[in-house]
Image (cartoon, rainbow, N blue to C red):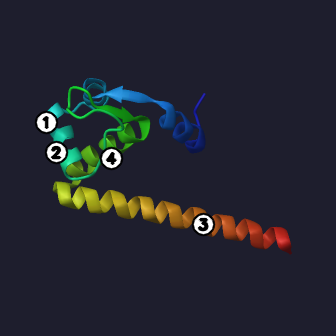
Amino acid sequence: MARNSTEAEMMDEFMQLTLHELCYDCQVNAEYVIELVEFGIVQPRRGRTPREWVFAGEDLVRVKKAERLRRDLEVNLPGVALSLDLIEEVRALRRQVEDLQRAFYRDE
């Protein structure tokens, strides 16, 4: 049974991954994830050192998107950071438009 995006997002909020698990699930190496952290693309939720880092499920999604941008479009890490931020902003704006449309049509 396929999950809708809201269910997947909710599960991602509660998921916790070590650096090793994140690397395994995304098929990337630890050095790459460390670079993503340095560029602010993902942020560990806990831990001071890479060995102690714990990531959320949303970071899993973000690392996979970052890797696709880097691999498929050959975008450098600053470009990946900007692209992901813009994608998230567009998604948030679309949600706002949908909410406004629902409120408008409900009031008619």
Disc 2 target residue: 35
Crowding near the residue tagged with mark 4, few <14, some 14–19, many ≥20 C-alpha atoms within 10 Å: some
Q: Amino acid at mark 1?
A: Glu
Circle number at residue 96: 3
Coordinates of residue 79 in the picture (x, y in percent): 22, 61
For marks 2 and 4, the one nearer the N-term is: 2
Crowding near the residue tagged with mark 1, few <14, some 14–19, many ≥20 C-alpha atoms within 10 Å: few
For marks 1 and 4, the one nearer the N-term is: 1
Q: CA distance from mark 3 to mark 4?
A: 23 Å
Crowding near the residue tagged with mark 2, few <14, some 14–19, many ≥20 C-alpha atoms within 10 Å: few
Q: CA distance from mark 2 to mark 3?
A: 32 Å
For marks 3 and 4, the one nearer the N-term is: 4
Which quarter of the picture shows residue 25?
A: top left
Q: Amino acid at mark 3?
A: Gln
- Point 28% across, 50% down: residue: 41
In the displayed structure, does residue 81 sit left or right of residue 15? Answer: left
Q: Secondary structure at mark 3?
A: helix
- Point 68% across, 70% down: residue: 100
Coordinates of residue 5 in the picture (x, y in percent): 55, 43
Q: Are marks 3 and 1 in contact (CB under 8 Å)?
A: no
Circle number at residue 65: 4
Q: Nearer the viewer, mark 2 or mark 4?
A: 2
Q: Is residue 4 visible?
A: yes
Q: CA distance from mark 1 to mark 4?
A: 17 Å
Q: Are marks 1 and 2 in contact (CB under 8 Å)?
A: yes
Disc 1 target residue: 31
